[in-house]
Image (cartoon, rainbow, N blue to C red):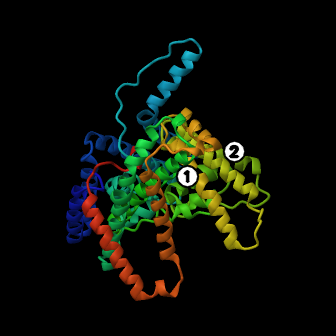
Amino acid sequence: MLFNSVTYLCFLTVMVIAYWLCSNNARRWLVLAASLAFYGFWRIEFVFLIAFSAFVDYFLSLRIYEEKCPRRRLYLLLISLNINIGLLVYFKYAYFIAENISTLGQSLDQSWDFSPGNIILPLGISFYTFLSISYTLDVYRKLFDPIRNFRDYLTYVMFWPHMIAGPILRAHELIPQIVRAPHFKLHNLIGGIKNIIIGLFLKVGLADQIAPWVDEAFKAPPSSLGGLDVWTMAFGFGLQIYFDFAGYSLIAVGSALLLGVHFPDNFNWPYLASSPREFWRRWHITLSAWIRDYLYLPLSGARFKDSSEGGIDIEFNDRSNSFRLAVALMLTWFIMGFWHGAGWMFALWGVWHATFILLYRVTKKWSPFSSAYLMNFLGWVITLPIIMLGWIPFRADSLKTSIELWQRVFDISSYRSLAFRENFYLLVFLFTFGMLLTWFLIHTKAPVIRHPWVRYSGEIMAFAIMIFLVFIFLRPISQFIYFQF
């Protein structure tokens, strides 16, 4: 069941009405049943896989909590981690591992070919694996007592608004909201509906409209493209994946809010970031925060945080071990790249971001301007192209293609010709300009624009246009990009 479908909107409407008519205990059963049905609508057999994985973590977490021997506690934790990571590796990386073993064998004149069989990737496996891992680790760290009721824990893992692609919440942030009896609030209803409308508009009105142009562009051989073509492709896919994933996140946030459950924001105008580090405080914030607490900070030797907000917002003092921090950063982003996909292109994407974050750390004290405004503007002018070029390996079909496309950017003579139809360049420009204009209108302090009547009138007009476009384009023609992760 896709968020961008009439089926989901009908499902959500029925669930919200039933939810607020039920008692608290009945609500908890209803949410679990709805989550099972939502996932089972895709493939029912994988519901049992998730339930099994959840039960293992639930049982082992109780044992970890009750165990007094540190060594045994560690063994129990390792069992849980091995099961979760093992399932993720098998379903997501088996083909990749087999392919690379075969390639290595060929280089050694050996026949190491083997087939892992017909493997179907469970929807959202990377996300609910992260949920399970964070829960077990937090119990091991004694941050909170484990959940005694398996129903509530399974609901946390399978809660349908965030199960497939986030936002990634910690157990102590979500489970109390599911267990308690929330009171109906009109502003939650209005806020939830607004988020869903904006999210659907971003997905079906923007992301799905530019997607065919981007797909067609990436089918072209790199040798036939010029530098401006590659920039257009990079910006085009950067806009597509942003509108697509931010749209999904807003629908998830809105769906949860209709049930009285609050999710943190997952995006905060990431393409307005003035540094690579700031970009990761604005893009997929809950994933960045998860990576910060469960990978980057432990590798850095620093104390972990305990929040799904803030992204990777880390400042170290001058006495910190710079070499260890650099290694931790590169390793973190290398793993983060592989988490997104089973391919060396994703690893390259991770290393790309790590490299520029390291460069930022070295150069951030150099300031050609005394004005913070000018420095932020200069930082944005430099950061945006870096981020957009970084999407090339994320979208390209191979490592070789990614490098060839980057080479075209630095071939000055290639800028003399254009390979695509003019509409593609115009569409990318209009989407970029529209995004910047929207940010300006929302954040400007100009008295004329901030006048209540102007803002209310503008908001009504904007939502009327978005609802109209959603009505025109709403159809499940493509799933969300992050569903494949």
Residue 31 appears left or right of 391: left
Give the mark toward the camera: 1 or 2. 1
Q: Secondary structure at mark 2?
A: helix
The total number of labels drawn is 2
Above or below — where is 193 with respect to 218? below
Residue pointed to by mark 1: 388
Whichever of labels 1 and 2 marks the residue nearer the N terminus, that label is 2
Badge 1 density bin: few <14, some 14–19, many ≥20, Cα 10 Å:
some
Q: Quadrant of residue 471?
A: bottom left
In the image, what residue type sits under mark 1? Met
Q: Position of residue 178 (x, y in %)?
A: 35, 64
Residue at x-position 72% and y-position 56%: 361
Residue at x-position 58% and y-position 17%: 107
In the image, what residue type sits under mark 2? Val
Q: Secondary structure at mark 1?
A: helix
Residue at x-position 59% and y-position 14%: 108
Residue pointed to by mark 2: 327
Residue at x-position 44% and y-position 19%: 114
State the residue in front, 193 or 215: 215
Q: Position of residue 169 (x, y in %)?
A: 45, 59
Residue 205 appears left or right of 94: left
